[in-house]
Every structure is written in structure tokens, then in C-alpha cells.
Image: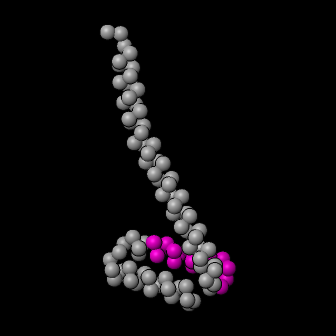
């Protein structure tokens, strides 16, 4: 096991002890991504390769969060738009 795996293992243990679920989930996802990359390459990751994996995972999470925000925005806007369209059509009806 390399230094990268040791650091991630330590982070996971500390997160468990602290009861920090968000940090724990994040470290587990990162550990899985690191392990997948190590399997792809066939060796323990260097510091540079580890940082590449971290950067890629950060980008993925940021994009997922942005997509979630856009979807949430659309779902909240849709009922408002229907309501406003209905009210507008009611206001246009002759008396």
C-alpha cells in the first residue's frame, strides 16, 4: 500500500471517529477513484497522479452540483410559470 492509500485510510478513520459523514463519504469516493486509477495503471499512484485524480473528482462533483441546481431551479420555476400563465389568462378574459 502506497503513501496515498495510507493518507486516505487515515482520513477515513479520522472522519469515522469525528462522526463527519460528509467528509467520510467524500474520502470514500476519493479512495474508490484512486483505487480504480491504480488498477487502470497497474501501480500505486505517484503524488502527481493522485492530484490528477483529485482534480478530476472535484470537477465531477462540481458539475454534478451545478446540474442538480439547474434541475432544482427548473422544477421550482415550472409550477410558478404555470400559475402565472393561468392568472394571466384569467385576467385577459372578458368580464
Apparent side of residue 40 relative to residue 76 in the rendered image (left or right): right
Q: Is 43 situated above or below 23? A: below
Residue 5, visible in the rendered structure: yes
Q: Is 57 situated above or below 39? A: above
**Residue at (42, 37) in percent of width and height:** 78
* Quarter of the image that includes the C terminus: top left
Q: Position of residue 11 (x, y in %)?
A: 44, 82
Residue 39, visible in the rendered structure: no
Is 28 one of the magenta-colored residues?
yes
**Residue at (61, 83) in percent of width and height:** 47
* Quarter of the image that includes the N terminus: bottom right
Majority secondary structure in the magenta region: helix
Q: What stretch of residues is rendered in magenta?
A: 26-43
Residue lying at the far top in this picture: please name it: 95
Q: Position of residue 51 (x, y in %)?
A: 59, 77
Image colouring: one colour
**Residue at (63, 79) in percent of width and height:** 49
Q: Quadrant of residue 56?
A: bottom right
Is 10 one of the magenta-colored residues?
no
Q: Is 84 situated above or below 47? A: above
**Residue at (39, 70) in percent of width and height:** 22
Amino acid at each position: 500500500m502506497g503513501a496515498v492509500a495510507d493518507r486516505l485510510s487515515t482520513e477515513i478513520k479520522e472522519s469515522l471517529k469525528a462522526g463527519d459523514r460528509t467528509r467520510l463519504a467524500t474520502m470514500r469516493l476519493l479512495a474508490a477513484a484512486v483505487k480504480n486509477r491504480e488498477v487502470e495503471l497497474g501501480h500505486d499512484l505517484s503524488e502527481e497522479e493522485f492530484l490528477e485524480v483529485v482534480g478530476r473528482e472535484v470537477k465531477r462533483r462540481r458539475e454534478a452540483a451545478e446540474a442538480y441546481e439547474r434541475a432544482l431551479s427548473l422544477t421550482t420555476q415550472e409550477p410558478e410559470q404555470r400559475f402565472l400563465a393561468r392568472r394571466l389568462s384569467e385576467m385577459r378574459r372578458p368580464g
